[in-house]
Amino acid sequence: MSEKVELKAKKVMEWTCGTLKYNWKSLTKVWFFSMLGTLALNLMVYSLVPSLMPRILDHWKIDALRISLIMSTIPQILNMCINPVLSTWSDKVRSRWGRRIPFVVISAPLLVLMMMLIGYHESLVPAFQKMTGWEMTEAAFWILCIITVVYQIFYLVPGAIQCYVAPDVIPKSFIGTYYGVVSLFGNLMGFAFNLWILPRADVAPKFWFGVIGVFYLVSMALQFLFVKEGKYPPNEKHEGGNVFVVIWKYVAAYAYECWSQPIYLCIFVASGVTAASTLVRSTFNVLFATNELGLTMTQYGQVFAYTSLVGAIISIPVGLIMDKKCHPLIIYFLSGVAVVIFNAWAYYYIKDYKTFYVAGVVIAVTYVVQNAASTPLLLRVVPNEKFGQFGSAGAIINCIICAVAGGVGGWLTKLYGYRMIFIWDFAVTLLSLVFMVMLWFMIKSNEKANGGKYIPPRPWLHGAKLINTND
């Protein structure tokens, strides 16, 4: 639990996060390098690869359903299987280098290698086509499918772990501001990426995969050197016995702790449905713009460059508001309402570059606000001492929902065209708002039962009945 202390003799401000102690200088250093690791991951796996993959697949005339399977359904199934293992494992690791960062560092070169293979896939397709006797399109599909699956497996290591680094090292009194600052620089980076890098990367993907891959490796190395995690108590010792019995006990305890409480199920489903609402848009937005509206990649990049710039402007105020005045769920809900309204408008009125620009900026900015509120919201609801475990439990629900949504969304897009992205986002976001309202009433009920203070249910303490007990 973070705490601010004023030393009367030296008048030095100090903050704590678990066993870690900071002054302004040391806090700034940890803040910067943990943020750098997050930004590098976001640039590579959430900007570069997702922006280029639909274009690469479309180049080979692969249909919308198959694109959705490669980019949505298969990765979500992998995430559902791998994320909980890695997240819970990292909660229990005790090493001189920390419990989270070693996972990220070890996986970095393998992840970059697989990304480079995506860039060089064209060199592999003719040989694979000759070996199998398939048509070139079919050979390209399976080469990209295999490379992407292996890439996703290696990506899931930092994808599952990196988001837990900041809650472990940043004092809680700053966590909303921290995510606001990360969002600020992430959007500034998005501005530069979309305006200058994306049009060039579309023409020369091999070069830009290499440049951003090197940036990622350097960033993770710096995070390893300058971000030190705290010390944690030893893990509880468990009885030995048959390995399958032990595994079953772990799985049963995991499921009971994370999914036996309605409030946790509600936030997991709300988050999963929200993620599903953006899934079809993130997959097919670039193809809607270039294939249906006739935009160039330069024009497409400009739209999202200025979207990122607007997002950067609002990031810090959103973080400060969450730290000082407003519950993250309120921000999360209001941004969802805005998404519903603007998707209804966009479906009927987007006809050209100008209208795509307006709708793209407005809708994307609302998601910037919502994303800035997502982790602080989870931190408010679940027990922070098992944040990795609960984060992975939420990821399982998220993956189940998104795996189904990816297939259904791809099928509907194949049937009705790329404009389906607006109908999908409208309907699924509307559903997510229902779960957010339910979550709000559950939080208020918990506060009422605990004297006005929210206490996360902990079913592992004193049996299932005593779920509102502090550590």
Image: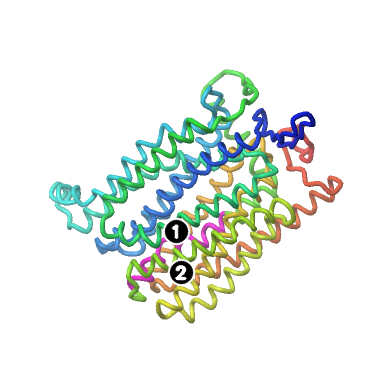
Q: Is residue 470 left or right of residue 309?
A: right
**Where in the figure is residue 215, as x and y percent of width and height?**
38, 43
Neighbourhood count class around disc 1 (C-alpha, 10 Å): few under 14, some 14–19, many 20 upward: many
Q: Could you say whether the residue bearing mark 2 is in a helix, strand or loop?
A: helix
Q: Residue drawn 56% across and 19% down?
A: 241
Near-viewer residue (400 or 136) = 136
Judge whether residue 282 is colored magenta. Answer: yes
Whether residue 168 is visible here, answered yes or no, is no
Quarter occupied by residue 444:
bottom right
| Above or below: residue 202 compared with residue 34 | below
Q: Is residue 10 left or right of residue 426?
A: right
**Where in the figure is residue 452, as x and y percent of width and height?**
84, 49
Near-viewer residue (36 or 42) = 36
Quarter occupied by residue 175:
top right
Q: Which mark is residue 161?
A: none
Task: Say which residue label 1 marks.
Answer: 406
Neighbourhood count class around disc 2 (C-alpha, 10 Å): few under 14, some 14–19, many 20 upward: many
Q: Quadrant of the N terminus?
A: top right
Calculate the distance from the C-alpha at mark 2 to the C-alpha at mark 1.
Answer: 12 Å
Near-viewer residue (129 or 388) = 388
Task: Say which residue label 2 marks.
Answer: 421
Quarter occupied by residue 109:
top left
Q: Residue furthest right?
A: 451
**Where in the figure is residue 259, as x and y percent of width and height?**
64, 44
Question: Which is nearer the N-term, disc 2 or disc 1?
Answer: 1
Whether residue 341 is visible here, answered yes or no, is yes
Verify CB contact (< 8 Å) between mark 2 and mark 1: no
Q: Is residue 162 left or right of residue 286?
A: right
Magenta span of residues: 272-291
Amino acid type indicated by mark 1: Gly
